[in-house]
Every structure is written in C-alpha cells, then in structure tokens.
Amino acid sequence: MLVVAGTSTRSVYPPGRGPHVNKADLITELADRMGGDHQLATEALENTLDIIVRAVASGESITIMGFGIFEKRARAARVARNPHTGESIPVPPTYSPAFRPGQYFKSVVQGTETLPEGRLAAKRSSSHQAFGGLRANGVDHRENVVGSAVAGSAQR
C-alpha cells in the first residue's frame, strides 16, 4: 500500500493481489503525483532505473541520502559441493548488485520514525533548497524559481 503525501492512505494494487507494488503501479502513482502525465512518469522512472543500473554495473555506487546506497559487491572465489555426489566444484569470483537502506529508511520501516504529513518522505534537508521545488503532491513548481535548471529548460 502506498501512502500519498498530503492525502489519505490508498491502495495501488488490485483486490486479492496482496501488498505488492510493481513497476506499473509505481508509474501510476508517480503520474498521479506529477499531475497525471503518465508518459512523463514512465520516462522518469525508466531513466532513473537505467542510470542506477549503468552506474552500478560500471562499479560506481549511487547514494540517495536518507534512502540508501546502490552498489556493486564482489563475491570471492570459493569451493562448493555438489549435494548429490559430494564432488568439489570451484566457483569463480562474481559480482552482484546490492542495496543498503539508509538510516532514515530503516527507522521508518522499524516504526521508530513516522512518515511526514504533507511533504515527501525522502525530501532533502533544508540545506538543499534546490530540491524543495516539489509540492506535497510531487508536482514541480520550480519554473517559478529564478535561475533554476528546470526553469531554464522550460524556456527553451
């Protein structure tokens, strides 16, 4: 179940499906928060995921303050055993993607922090004013901010 900032709690999954949110559900929720533009929401999510996958695959880590870190982890070479024959099988070193949740995210999930009412849960702190251009519903109003990158791109 997703909680929309500033509104009542609502379910984004069909009855009987259980507490599961898939990519289409995320796009629908994002479109609702961005003024109903489904195509823009689809592009935003797909491009965000593409950036994360490409960065992690190349060995970079992506840190989203308060949310978590996406990173590439190395697994050392090891010896495994075939459970049927007991034969030793060498396993080469591998890499796998990993996610480490941030402290705020952990605290919210554990119930030691509550989600804020009327604003985004993963919003940057007040020291990062450029991020503050989203209304409680997630709709961008930064075009009204002089010198903002969004305002500059909207004028083109």
Image (cartoon, rainbow, N blue to C red):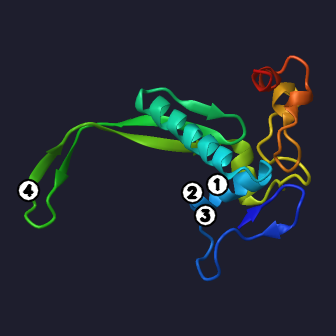
Ranked by sequence position, the earlier of labels 1 and 3 is 3
In this rendered view, identify the residue nearer to me: 153 or 149. Answer: 153
In this rendered view, identify the residue nearer to me: 63 or 2. Answer: 2
In this rendered view, identify the residue nearer to me: 120 or 140. Answer: 140
Residue type highlighted by circle 3: Val
Q: Residue at x 82, y 24 (%)?
A: 151
Work out which residue is located at the far top of the displayed protein and give it: 147
Mark 2 — residue?
23
Task: Say whether marks 2 and 1 touch (CB < 8 Å).
Answer: yes
Q: Residue at x 88, y 43 (%)?
A: 135
Mark 3 — residue?
21
Q: Residue at x 85, y 55 (%)?
A: 5
Residue 143 lies in quadrant: top right
Separation of residues labelled 3 and 4 (CA atoms): 42 Å
Separation of residues labelled 2 and 1 (CA atoms): 6 Å
Horizontal side of 100 relative to 140 (left or right) equals left
Question: In this picture, is 82 found above or below 138?
Answer: below
Secondary structure, mark 4, is: loop
Task: Classify mark 4: residues with Cα within 10 Å, few (<14), some (14-19) or many (20+).
Answer: few
Ranked by sequence position, the earlier of labels 1 and 4 is 1
Residue type highlighted by circle 4: Glu
Mark 4 — residue?
87
Q: Residue at x 91, y 52 (%)?
A: 118
Ranked by sequence position, the earlier of labels 4 and 2 is 2
Mark 1 — residue?
27
